[in-house]
Image: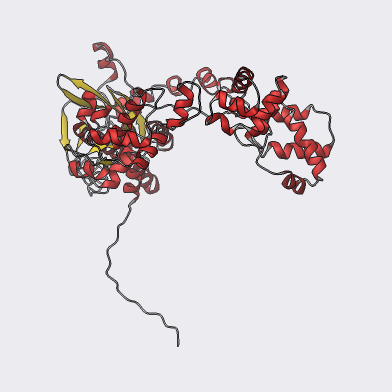
Amino acid sequence: MGLEQKLSLKLSQRLVMTPTLQQAIKLLQMTRLELQDVVNQEIVENPVLEEDEVVEAPSVGETEEAGPPSETYEAMDVQGPSGEGPDGGESRQSTSSEDGSASSQEGIPPSPAPGGPEAEIPADPSTESFDQIDFEAYFGDYLEGSAATAPRMSEEGEEYSLENRAEAPPGLDYHLAEQLGVSETSAVLREACAFMIGNLDADGYLRVSLQEVAAAIPCDEAEAQAALELLQSFDPPGVGARDLHECLLIQARAEGVSTPLLEDLVTNRLADLATKAVPVLARQMNVSPEELQQAIDVLKRLDPKPGRRYDSSRTIYVEPDVQVVKVDDDYVVLFNDDGLPRLRVSSFYRRLLGSADGPLDGEGRSYLREKMRAAQWLMKSLDQRKRTIVRVAESIVRKQRDYLDWGVAHLKPLILRDVADDIGMHESTVSRVVSNKWMATPRGLLPMKFFFHSAISSSVGEDVSSLAVKGKIKALVAAEDASQPLSDARLSELLAREGIRIARRTVAKYREELHIPSSSIRKVERGPAGPPA
């Protein structure tokens, strides 16, 4: 069969993800802190974008000297050329002219008048007109002499000085490496110990075997054992252990509180502490309950995760994206834009691009056009992100008003499709909105995903949210008799009396998610001494 080249036509439909749509989707699922970093980086990379700083209103004399204000584009108002957001909704662009009047129009600003200085710029959907630009305001604000534009070295040095940079605290590996550096040992043991330090987890436990250490260095198992003993002698006590029993024993011996009873308890009876009462366990170990209780008290003071105190992971702070405020008898959703830069397009570059006899050549003009278009698309994406988040939050508030009024017992089952159908968006868009977003409500600071839960069938009316069922289980356990705790089957019967049909295994699953121990353990912990039920 011979090979040949030929042309063929094929008609098909496919979804085209334009760069603008990809940017809008990416911004939509970002947190506030991530969005702030992206916007600040865009301001640095795009010369057309400027941060609109909030300044006090100037006096009459200052206004006359400075001239008319420059054109300002806020991220809340300026849209891109198409006027459509990532969800297909229409948006409008609002600009401010020099005489203070505002005009709202679709898409881009109007085309310049024929014969004007901007007449050479074609008025097509992919370009923008730049006729209402104030050169004087730009030069008055930014180019007013070399002293105003030159960077002040004292402030730059203060801001970027190495002395002002926060240094991360040393981690566990650094702390152990310092102790290894001052240890008097052979080169082989030092190398084996350093290899073990590199294979410790965040809790301080060794996650490689002695055979693997001996094969990696290389050395024999006796030298690997000596290196392990050296590592386990370092601070914090218990580091380098291979399991919980060894970790507790190392700490007890290092602190001088180790006894034969404590070692027997840790080695052979550690699992029995969670299921057996102290008198029963003391009888099985042939010791008095007082002696066993003293050993248990010593055991409670030991740290099962010694490496955690040197954990240098950064704390993630949460800021709400929206705030729900009750006004009279209604809830109002407010978008939290504190800390987000307010963007505007530089009037200087708009005038420079619109000038027919300016110093720009063809390549420079094309570069500025591309940056201007990217700036407007970024502002449009930010505006659509705000509108979408607010619409989703308002839909959640409408559907979960009973929870805001009365608490978790009145939380209704809700899925993403319910909100998507309510606001006319796709389910994937709602999923991106609620991801890593937080809402400040009168009931506290909650993630948006908190309001989405599966439904549990009820015989008394509407379905009940699984979170409301968990709240009922927690309340029943809190009110139970300590001497006769409620079993999972009994909890299922009590919920059935309230019209909630739920299986015993589902009650057990919800109880474990609430970190509530079983009825036998609760009786041991809170009930009188005696064998568990």
Front in this rendered view, residue 266 or 370: 266
Front in this rendered view, residue 108 or 513: 513
Front in this rendered view, residue 457 or 320: 457
x, y percent for residue 408: 27, 28
x, y percent for residue 414: 25, 39
Q: Image check: 339 left or right of 387?
A: right
Q: Quadrant of the N terminus?
A: bottom left
Residue at 35 percent across and 40 percent down: it is 504
Residue at 68 percent across and 34 percent down: it is 241
Q: In which quarter of the image is the C terminus?
A: top left
Q: Image check: 277 left or right of 222?
A: left
The answer to whether any part of residue 238 appears in the image is: no
x, y percent for residue 203: 60, 32
Number of numbered tags placed on the structure image: 0
Q: Is residue 192 above or below residue 408?
A: below
Q: In which quarter of the image is residue 516?
A: top left
x, y percent for residue 525: 48, 24
